[in-house]
């Protein structure tokens, strides 16, 4: 897999982290109560994923196979923590909007999953592409779930009211059960189309 | 299994963790001061939001009472108190500005874990602006007070009222002493 476009497309569609690999579920369910939150989480994760993939790929020949998981965890956690410190100290405005997601990224298994499945076996350029693909795939998935939940639950899209005030809001959708409903329905629909295509 | 197979991974892991620890130590050291300044700035900005007439605030050493977490004396004689009353799902951190004669100058919910779309509306101006200019006692209309509770979030609204009430009571009881 050396074609960068193919690697990116693979991350967004064929191996979409949320809908196909089904990893990183905790932040997926937790932050998608609105589209903006979903996109914020998605893009922050993408940025971390690209850098983590690059680091792991560069270190892949030095890290012995037996201790690779602890090495990956140390590298990723260090990187995220440094970013958090720097954001807090020098970019408080960005920290105010993204700070909420940073602790969630550290425990996000997409980063470790991609380090293990891709970056530890491929060169730096391919690994960056894989980070971009999976990061965008994650962002798109979170944005879609966020849009649906926000629309049904609060009657808004990107914080702009679109449903008339008189129309009842289904508040359940911005609470935890709504996240499961939305995710399940979306996955079912995607699988349906995928199976149809195969047949 | 020879020694090389055991030693090499251990040494590499040791080097990686040592480098990581050193980097973290350096970054933490370098950013400690800027982060402290930023935190102070954020605090000053939010205090100014609840007490627009004041320009500087000084933290008071107080006896912990109820859910009051901190108290500040403003340069115009007023007080800013932070309270953490219990809401629907955890503490609702609230900042209250009160003049020396016991009139509320502003209320802001600074941190909470209330239900999105319901209790979370306590952070909206439509709710918190109701407190401006009130004095003596505050309560939601359901309890016979003057504050219109957030729809379907009476518990959160009541929590904010309780917190503000505590702040009012504190200023009434201790305001003269500072």
Image (cartoon, coloured by chain):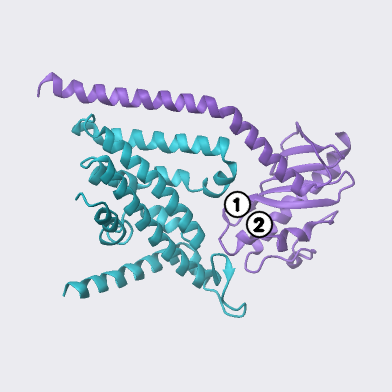
Mark 2 packing: few (<14 Cα in 10 Å), some, or many (20+)? some
**What chain letter is assigned to the residue under label 2?**
B
Direction from residue A160 to residue B140 in the image, left or right: right
Q: What is the number of the mark on residue A117?
A: none
SS at badge 1? loop
**What chain letter is assigned to the residue under label 1?**
B
Instruction: Of the two numbered discs 2 and 1 on the same chain, state the one appearing first in sequence.
Output: 1
Residue holding disc 2: B123
Residue holding disc 1: B112
Q: Are marks 2 and 1 in contact (CB under 8 Å)?
A: yes
- Is residue B169 placed above or below B30 in the rendered structure? below
- Of the pair A9 and A100, the residue shown nearer to us: A9
Q: Which chain is purple?
A: B
Horizontal and vertical percent position of residue A79: 40, 36
Q: Residue at x 80, y 64 (%)?
A: B146
- Of the pair A143 and B80, the residue shown nearer to us: A143
Q: Residue at x 31, y 62 (%)?
A: A19
Q: Which chain is cyan?
A: A
Direction from residue A158 to residue A75 in the image, left or right: left
Horizontal and vertical percent position of residue A159: 57, 65
- Is residue B115 placed above or below A100 in the rendered structure? below
- Of the pair A191 and A45, the residue shown nearer to us: A45
């Amino acid at each position: 897999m050396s074609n960068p476009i193919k690697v990116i497309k693979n991350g967004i569609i064929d191996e979409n982290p949320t809908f196909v690999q089904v990893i990183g579920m905790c932040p997926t369910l937790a932050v998608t109560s609105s589209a903006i939150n979903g996109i914020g989480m998605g893009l922050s994760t993408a940025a971390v994923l690209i850098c983590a993939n690059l680091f792991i790929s560069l270190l892949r020949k030095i890290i012995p196979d037996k201790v690779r998981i602890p090495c990956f965890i140390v590298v990723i956690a260090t990187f995220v923590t440094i970013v958090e410190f720097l954001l807090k100290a020098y970019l408080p405005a960005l920290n105010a909007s993204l700070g909420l997601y940073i602790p969630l990224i550290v425990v996000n298994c997409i980063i470790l999953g991609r380090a293990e499945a891709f970056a530890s076996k491929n060169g730096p350029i391919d690994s960056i592409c894989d980070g971009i693909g999976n990061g965008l795939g994650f962002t798109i998935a979170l944005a879609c779930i966020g849009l649906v939940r926000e629309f049904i639950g609060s009657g808004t899209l990107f914080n702009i009211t679109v449903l008339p005030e008189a129309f009842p809001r289904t508040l359940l959708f911005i609470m935890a059960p709504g996240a499961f409903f939305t995710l399940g329905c979306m996955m079912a629909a995607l699988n349906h189309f995928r199976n149809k295509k195969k047949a | 299994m020879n020694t090389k197979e055991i030693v090499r991974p251990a040494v590499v892991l040791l080097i990686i963790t040592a480098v990581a620890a050193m980097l973290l130590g350096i970054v933490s050291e370098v950013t400690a001061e800027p982060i402290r300044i930023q935190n102070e700035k954020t605090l000053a900005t939010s205090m100014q939001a609840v007490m627009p007439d004041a320009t500087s605030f000084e933290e008071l050493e107080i006896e912990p009472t109820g859910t009051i977490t901190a108290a500040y004396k403003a340069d115009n004689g007023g007080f800013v108190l932070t309270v953490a009353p219990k809401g629907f799902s955890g503490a609702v951190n609230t900042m209250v500005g009160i003049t020396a004669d016991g009139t509320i100058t502003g209320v802001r919910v600074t941190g909470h874990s209330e239900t999105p779309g319901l209790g979370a509306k306590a952070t909206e101006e439509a709710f918190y602006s109701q407190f401006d200019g009130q004095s003596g006692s505050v309560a939601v209309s359901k309890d016979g007070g003057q504050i219109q509770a957030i729809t379907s979030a009476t518990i959160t609204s009541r929590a904010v009222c309780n917190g503000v009430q505590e702040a009012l009571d504190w200023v009434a009881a201790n305001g003269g002493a500072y």
